[in-house]
Amino acid sequence: MADTVPVRCPACRRDHLFASPVYPCACGAPLAPPLLRAARPEPISHRTWTDDWVMVRCLHCGRQDHWPQPELGCPCGAVLRIPVRPVSAPTPPEAPPSPTRPARIPLPRTATVPRPSFRPVTIRTERDAVTAAALYLTWLGFRDVVRTEIRRPSGIDLRGPGLIAQVDPSTRAATLRDVECLWLNGLTTSAASVFFSLAGYADDARSRADDLGIPLFVMDLTGRPQPVNGPADELISTGA
């Protein structure tokens, strides 16, 4: 259950009752960052990666990972950062861990309903990379895939019903943060997340994507995406 704490805005002195947001852990258990009741909220004047994420431990499986820092938006316009109890601080006794889940086993690359061969688009420009990814998603079975006007540091968004995809046409490997941000965007919209990169992925980004079930694809200049993890193999096998 999420923590609930009283919060007083230091700007307008208005009182609020704040509940910690709940997210699913990689093990499937609901996880809410534990709030630090004795600490005062901190107004946010600028953002950094360090301040926007906190380390939280799942009481169900014991996993420690980064989660979004809880924030409260006051009607006066102030945005307050709600302090979280550090992982190293004493915590209530943990529940017994659930039985270990079996490792994901990639399914054979044979779709239930045969699909025609994918026709790649040669990649010469950034636009070509986005077009190739959109065509591939359509080939997988996603409908009405379109490019959005959203341009993120990690690439370009593609959207469709129940889908959010990221296309990184840069020459740098996609990072752990890139993968986690895509997952959070998919989580908030209840959409499947898929990542395409021209330069591949950092090792920790691939490991995190496996934990979160995010398909990762890498594209070469021929425009034919190749799966690089189990969830991508499974998506090819089953289709959208």
Image (cartoon, rainbow, N blue to C red):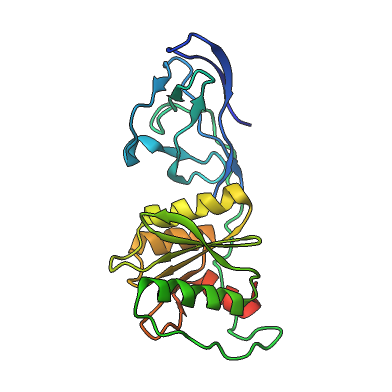
Q: Is residue 106 visible?
A: no
Which residue is found at the position 40% from the left and 30% from the top?
86
Looking at the picture, how far across and down is residue 90, in whole percent? 44, 26
**Above-or-below relation of 124 to 186:** below
Which residue is found at the position 66% from the left and 70% from the top?
143
Quick check: 162 left or right of 226? right
Which residue is found at the position 32% from the left and 71% from the top?
199
**Above-or-below relation of 200 to 163:** below
**Above-or-below relation of 54 to 235:** above
Which residue is found at the position 38% from the left and 52% from the top?
177
Quick check: 171 left or right of 19? left
Q: Nearer the viewer, residue 211 or 216?
A: 216
Looking at the picture, how far across and down is residue 56, in whole percent? 45, 38
**Above-or-below relation of 111 to 206:** below
Residue projecting furthest to the right: 113
Quarter of the rendering containing residue 106: bottom right
Q: Nearer the viewer, residue 25 or 215?
A: 215
Looking at the picture, how far across and down is residue 207, in whole percent? 42, 62
Residue projecting furthest to the bottom: 117
Q: Is residue 117 visible?
A: yes
How many numbered markers are drawn? Answer: 0
Quarter of the rendering containing residue 108: bottom right
Quarter of the rendering containing residue 128: bottom left
Q: Quadrant of the image for the N terminus?
A: top right
Looking at the picture, how far across and down is residue 232, in whole percent? 52, 72
